[in-house]
Every structure is written in C-alpha cells, then in structure tokens.
Image (spheres, rainbow, N blue to C red):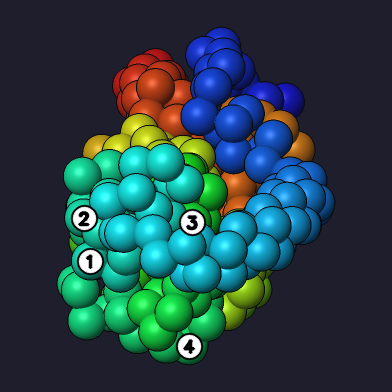
Amino acid sequence: MPRGKKIIIETEVDDEFVNKFRSIDLEEIRSDRKRTEKGLSSSVANVFKVAQNLYRQKAGEEELETKHELYSVRGAYDYLKDSGVFISFRAFGGRIERGTVPFVKVGRKRFIPKSILQDIVDTKGEFYTVKEAFEEYKKANNRINFRAFIGRIEKGSIPSVKFGTRRLVPKDAVEALTHISNNYYSVSQAIKELNKSGIKIKRNAFERRLDRGRIPHEKVGGRRFIHEDVLRELVDKEQSFKRS
C-alpha cells in the first residue's frame, strides 16, 4: 500500500469565517450601491429645491440643521466625528471640493444633507479603505507589505469594490483573512512546521496529498490553507507512523 494512504486525517473543520468570505458577492454589493446612489441623487435634487426656498426665506443655520437636516461643512464634520468616522477637517473639505461628498448651496454657503452623511457612516461601518484594510490585516500577518497587499487586491484574491473614486474592502473579508492568518498555515508554512517536527516531505509530495484530498484544507483567495488542528493531527500521526 502506498505510504500516504496509511495516514487518514479525521479532523473536520466547518469554519464560519471561511464560509463568510466565500459568500461575499461583489456583484450584489455593486447593485446595492447603485440603488443607494440613485436614492441619494434623488434626495439631493429634492433638497436643492428646498434650499433655494430657504435662501429666499433667509433661514438661519440652526433652522437648516434641526428642521431640514442640512449641515454646514463644520456641522457635517462634527456629525461624522460623533458617529465614529475620523477624518481630518482638511481631508473632508477636500472631498467636498472634489464633489465626492455632494452638497447644496444656500446662498454662498455649502450644506450637506443628512442622508449623505449617514451614507458615509454606514459605508464606514461595512468597509475599510485599502490602507485601513492593510493595517488591520497586518496585525495578524506582519510578513505582508503594502505593495503585496495591493497586488492581491489587483489580482482579486482580496475582494474589493469601487464606490465612485474610492476602492473599498469589505470588513467581512478582512475579518476572515485575519482569522485565517491566526488559525491556518499556508502550504509553505505547513511544510516548514512538518520539517521542524522531524517530518521530511517535499513540496510536490505535500501538494499531491492536498490535490488528492488526503489532507483537508481550504482554498481562499486562490491560495490553500491547512487548519492548525488538521496539521497537528498530521504531525502526530506522521510521528507515530515513523516510530512504528
């Protein structure tokens, strides 16, 4: 009997984080975003008409904010800050200047509708910027650099979407990848771990076992990962087989 068939791995892993990663549907996210943007566009158009009337009525800032949910640039910045969106005032002003944060004018002053601000808050709750995603993931995988992380996004192994000019990464994806880094071995790491335990195996032989399903593993973002419990059982059985 071929040597590999003597070892049967019994550990089964049903990982909710891996399942969550696989269930990320970028097309659905894009479709939802189109609907959201259409609704926001309609909302801003309606607010624009109201704003013109308010200007003629010489409404004050307090009335605009409390009654009509229109925030001055400073008021909008404070609203975001109080809602957990931390961005410098200068950067926020830059987004307004570039039109990435829609606004209406009441006289000479710019005001941002609450619906726009709430959309920013909701987006922040579900997505990371690329830089934020990298910083979060690096806590679990300090071997990766920013350039390599960008490369994975460009290849699609880390899912991302574009909202306007901004590229964002779903928080569920980063959470899953962080979990995998903490609880799984890549193929290279698994082989190193086996070698450290006195089990010599070539990469080709190890990958053949993966191909034939003899070593349970997960494929995430085009890469194969072996759960730590699976590898522990493999090491124990290899060492027992070696002693027998």
At label 2, which amino acid type do we have? Asp
Residue 188 sits in which quadrant?
Answer: bottom left
Q: Which residue is mark 4?
A: 98
Q: CA distance from mark 4 to mark 2?
A: 20 Å
Q: CA distance from mark 4 to mark 1?
A: 17 Å
Q: Which residue is mark 1?
A: 74
Q: Which residue is mark 3?
A: 113
Q: CA distance from mark 1 to mark 2?
A: 6 Å
Mark 1 touching mark 2, by CB under 8 A? yes
Name the element at disc 2.
helix
Nearer to the camera, 113 or 146: 113
Q: CA distance from mark 4 to mark 3?
A: 17 Å
Mark 2 or 3, nearer chain start: 2
For the question of whether residue 103 can be seen, the reply is no
Circle on res. 15 = none
Using the image, determine if residue 139 lies above or below residue 6. below
Q: Which residue is mark 2?
A: 78
Q: Nearer the viewer, mark 4 or mark 3?
A: 3
Q: Residue at x 58, y 69 (%)?
A: 52
Category of crowding for the residue at label 1, using alpha-carbon neighbours closer than 10 angstroms: few (below 14), some (14–19), many (at least 20)? few
| Image x and y of residue 128, in percent | 41, 56
Q: Residue at x 69, y 57 (%)?
A: 46
Mark 4 or 2, nearer chain start: 2
Category of crowding for the residue at label 4, using alpha-carbon neighbours closer than 10 angstroms: few (below 14), some (14–19), many (at least 20)? few
Nearer to the camera, 233 or 159: 159
